[in-house]
Amino acid sequence: MRENWKNKARAGYWLITHLLVGVLTLIIGIKLGTNLTFQQLIGLTTSAYNANQAERLIRTEPPITQENVDFSLFWETWNRLERDYYDLTKLDAQKMVYGAIAGMTSAIGDPYTVFLTPETKKRLDEDLQGEFGGVGIQLGYRDNQLAVIAPLKDHPAQKAGVKAGEYILKIKDKLKDIEVDTIGMSAEEAVNLIRGQKGTAVTLTLALPNEDPRDVELVREIIEIPSVELEIIEGENGRVAHVVLSRFGDKTMVEWEKIVNSILQDKSIVGIILDMRNNPGGYLEAGIDLASEFVDGGIIVSQQGRQSTQHYRATRQGRLQNYPVVVLVNKGSASASEIVAGALRDRRNTVLIGEQTFGKGTVQDAQKIGNNGAGLNITIARWLLPSGQSIQDSGLPVDIEVVDDLASEDRDEAVEKAQEELYNRL
């Protein structure tokens, strides 16, 4: 595992970013104006396809609260596409509606508030389940540009030298006859393009800031990764549990339970290194449960919504609260991993080692919408550490900065420093 983490460190930093800035430019805008009926709206322009259009769309009545919204520009655009666009086979009514909804959420300007098509939602659910077909990249945004949050260890992207923080400029798939720039592309669109059948190839054009772009061809494989792993580090002052937590997914707490039991049963363990480098987050509840293992009750995180603030307190008995603990983070640590790191820092004065974290300090409610598997992620609040601090965009600073020496293949400097700090606290 030590060598794997060296490889992971070589890949750089993360995230979830700024996840999801999707916009489809099919529908350009919505104009406020007079109250028009659906029949009046579709009659604003003449088109040979108006009848077919009306037949394809159902439940078109506006909600009572939006009766004064003028959709004339929407329908005029729709009608002109059907009247003038040269290839009618490209005009898919369902995709056009999805595009309009995606444009509506994108107009808010929050990259985390997004509409998910059924296919995209299915893909994201696979992420949290820990099994999917792809190249092993966590996607997010840097400066509103699609970027690599973190390459997953021992998978195609990491093996090919893909670095966390690299911008993804273009995606090319010869088999699918696709070659597209990623400007304005949502993370969901990118995931759908990058993933595919095992054994097929996808080429990514990547670049770090101030460096020339490069093309990397990656062959897809089935991605199956545990979210929690345990390594025991031997040392002169005792054995240390190195717990690597890569995400907060569907199986995380089941896997975590086994790890905790192993630690408690080994009476020779003197401390814990909680390693959340390149952990892009996941379920808030899992983060709260896990942080609760290290504290004696009290607040783990607070959620500040539009009208009120909700405090989330420890949910577990704190089975690991008597162990000295050091936390490893880096630029790929985001969201729930930042919540855990911040809670341990504020509640236990835990030392953070590595690099400043990503800075995703908002909470999304993942909702099902419609009856065909679509989803809607809505930012409902920002979260605050026990100290009251928000880390949105700024991230968590570390107490001890350790940048891994890429020239060394068999050492993990951050883990070594964490082990040293633990021994100093015995």
Image (spheres, grey):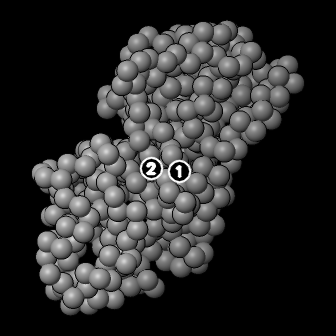
The kind of residue on which mark 1 rests is: Lys
The residue at 66%/45% (across/down) is 250
Residue marked by disc 2? 376
Q: Quadrant of residue 326?
A: top right
Cα gap from disc 2 to disc 1, whole angstroms: 6 Å
Q: Residues within 10 Å of mark 2 (few under 14, many from 20)?
A: many
Q: Quadrant of residue 175?
A: bottom left
Element assignment for label 2 = strand
Q: Is residue 37 above or below residue 255?
A: below
Label pair 2/1, CB-CB below 8 angstroms: yes
Q: Position of residue 172 (x, y in %)?
A: 37, 76
Q: Earlier in the sequence, mark 2 or mark 1?
A: 1
Between 12 and 32, which is closer to the camera in this rendering? 32
Residue marked by disc 1? 368
Q: Quadrant of the C terminus?
A: top right
The kind of residue on which mark 2 rests is: Leu
Element assignment for label 1 = strand
Q: Is residue 192 above or below residue 355?
A: below
Q: Position of residue 171 (x, y in %)?
A: 36, 70
Q: Residues within 10 Å of mark 1 (few under 14, many from 20)?
A: some
Between 396 and 189, which is closer to the camera in this rendering? 189
The answer to whether residue 64 is seen in the rendering is yes
The residue at 87%/24% (across/down) is 265
The answer to whether residue 345 is seen in the rendering is no
The residue at 85%/19% (across/down) is 267
The residue at 37%/21% (across/down) is 307
Q: Position of residue 164 (x, y in %)?
A: 41, 49
Q: Position of residue 299 (x, y in %)?
A: 56, 12
Between 195 and 62, which is closer to the camera in this rendering? 62
Direction from residue 74 to residue 410 in the image, left or right: right
